[in-house]
Image (cartoon, rainbow, N blue to C red):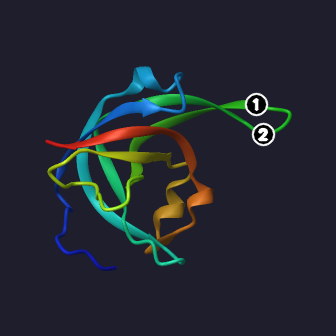
């Protein structure tokens, strides 16, 4: 994976931005960027944020739907804005993905569709 400057170890704060009002009360969350991930399509700027304070989120899944309680100790973010990256001085809008199964993080590549896109956020460097 290519980066001009590693942001591993950078402290960030993710605030709510849009797309899921039910998730809004769980933000803001602060944490540390612990890992960089890529996709097989060559997108290499997804980042795992280890949260200072984990949370629980009840999500609706399937048709007919059921509920699943998810304990979130980390989530994955990536900038939504072209020319902006997580961890830079300027805040950026991010996709927030919840990790449904920790085993999905064992390799260097992820399949974004295997994670739950819960909301959009604004990511600030602390």
Kind of element beneath mark 2: loop
Q: Where is residue 111 in the image (x, y as percent from the top left)?
A: 57, 66
Q: From this view, report whether residue 99 is shown above or below residue 65.
A: below
Q: From this view, report whether residue 92 is shown above or below residue 7.
A: above
Task: Pick the residue in front: 110 or 123.
Answer: 123
Q: Which residue lies furthest to the right in this view?
A: 64
- Location of mark 1 (residue): 66
Checking the image for residue 43, the label placed there is none
Image position of 103 (left or right of 76):
right
Residue that appears at 36% across and 28% down: 27
Q: Where is residue 63 in the image (x, y as percent from the top left)?
A: 84, 37
Q: Position of residue 14 (x, y in %)?
A: 31, 38
- Residue 80 seen by the camera: yes
- Location of mark 2 (residue): 62
Residues at marks 2 and 1 touching, judged by CB atoms closer than 8 Å:
yes
Residue that appears at 35% across and 55% down: 48
Give neighbour class at mark 1: few <14, some 14-19, many 20+ (Cα, 10 Å). Answer: few
- Residue 54 seen by the camera: no
Q: Residue furthest front?
A: 82
Task: Pick the residue in front: 118 or 90.
Answer: 90
Residue that appears at 47% across and 78% down: 42
Image position of 105 (left or right of 58):
left
Q: From this view, report whether residue 12 is shown above or below residue 6.
A: above
Q: For residue 52, which quarter of the picture?
A: top left
Report, in whole angstroms, how far the alpha carbon at label 2 lies from the one at label 1.
Answer: 6 Å
Q: Where is residue 19 in the image (x, y as percent from the top left)?
A: 54, 33
Residue that appears at 61% across and 57% down: 114
| Image quadrant in which the C terminus is located | top left
Give neighbour class at mark 2: few <14, some 14-19, many 20+ (Cα, 10 Å). Answer: few
Task: Pick the residue in front: 58 or 11.
Answer: 11
Kind of element beneath mark 1: strand
């Amino acid at each position: 994976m290519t980066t001009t400057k590693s942001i591993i170890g950078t402290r960030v704060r993710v605030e709510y931005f849009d797309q899921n009002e039910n998730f809004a009360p769980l933000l803001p969350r602060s944490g540390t960027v612990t890992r960089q991930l890529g996709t097989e399509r060559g997108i290499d700027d997804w980042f795992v944020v280890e949260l200072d304070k984990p949370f629980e989120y009840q999500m609706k899944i399937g048709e007919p739907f059921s509920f699943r309680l998810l304990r979130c100790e980390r989530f994955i973010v990536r900038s939504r804005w072209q020319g902006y990256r997580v961890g830079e001085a300027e805040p950026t809008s991010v996709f927030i993905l919840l990790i449904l199964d920790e085993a999905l993080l064992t390799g260097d590549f992820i399949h974004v569709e295997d994670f739950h896109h819960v909301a959009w956020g604004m990511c600030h460097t602390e």
